[in-house]
Image: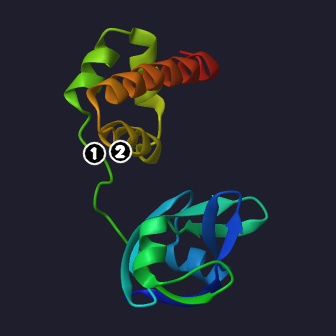
């Protein structure tokens, strides 16, 4: 049975999001991020409730859902959510996997990323339209993974 609530969309930097109240968090009875699926103004939605300091949690609304649902900042939306047990992992593209296998620090850094972070990187790489752009993105991704490894340590 899904939990339902209303919330006003607001913009924070380049992100659009809504706040979910304490009743939503207590409904899921989980710590940390909660993968969810449901509806925003009766349009299908898959996302993640993200805990925030000072706010119980937020739900990010990407451009695709805002466009499909015809919603924008300042509007009140009706949200229905339930826990989504489906894996959010995407397969690692072979060219990225090959680049990671050639750099141990990058591989360790990549493996320490959250599923959402890995997914974001994979979607970004797969979104390249030209081979040259894809190669540049993979190089940048490897650099990012090494930086993560160096910050987080072994």
The reply to whether discs 1 and 2 touch (Cβ–Cβ < 8 Å) is yes
Label 1 crowd bin: few (<14), some (14–19), many (20+), radius 10 Å: few
Q: Which quarter of the picture shows residue 56?
A: bottom right
- Identity of the residue drawn at 38% across and 80% down: 38
Q: Quadrant of the N terminus?
A: bottom left
Towards the viewer: 52 or 72 = 72
Q: Which mark is residue 72?
A: none
- Identity of the residue drawn at 32% across and 8% down: 102
Residue holding disc 2: 123
User: Residue 107, position in %: x, y?
Assistant: 39, 19
Q: Does dot 2 land on a helix, a strand or a loop?
A: helix
Outermost residue to the left = 94
Residue holding disc 1: 90
Towards the viewer: 112 or 67 = 67
For residue 108, side relative to residue 92 (left or right)? right
57 over 130 or under it: above or below: below
């Amino acid at each position: 049975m899904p939990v339902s609530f209303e919330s006003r969309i607001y913009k924070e930097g380049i992100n659009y999001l809504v706040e979910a109240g304490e009743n939503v968090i207590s409904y899921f009875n989980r710590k940390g991020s909660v993968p969810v699926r449901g509806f925003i103004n009766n349009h299908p939605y898959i996302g993640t409730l993200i805990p925030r300091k000072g706010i119980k949690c937020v739900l990010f609304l990407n451009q695709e859902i805002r466009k499909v649902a015809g919603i924008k900042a300042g509007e009140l939306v009706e949200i229905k959510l339930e826990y989504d047990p489906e894996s959010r992992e995407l397969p690692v593209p072979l060219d990225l996997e090959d680049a990671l296998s050639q750099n141990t620090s990058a591989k360790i850094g990549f493996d320490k990323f959250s599923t959402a972070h890995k997914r974001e990187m994979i979607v970004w790489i797969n979104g390249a339209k030209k081979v040259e752009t894809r190669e540049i993105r993979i190089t940048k991704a490897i650099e990012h993974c090494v930086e993560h490894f160096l910050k987080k340590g072994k």
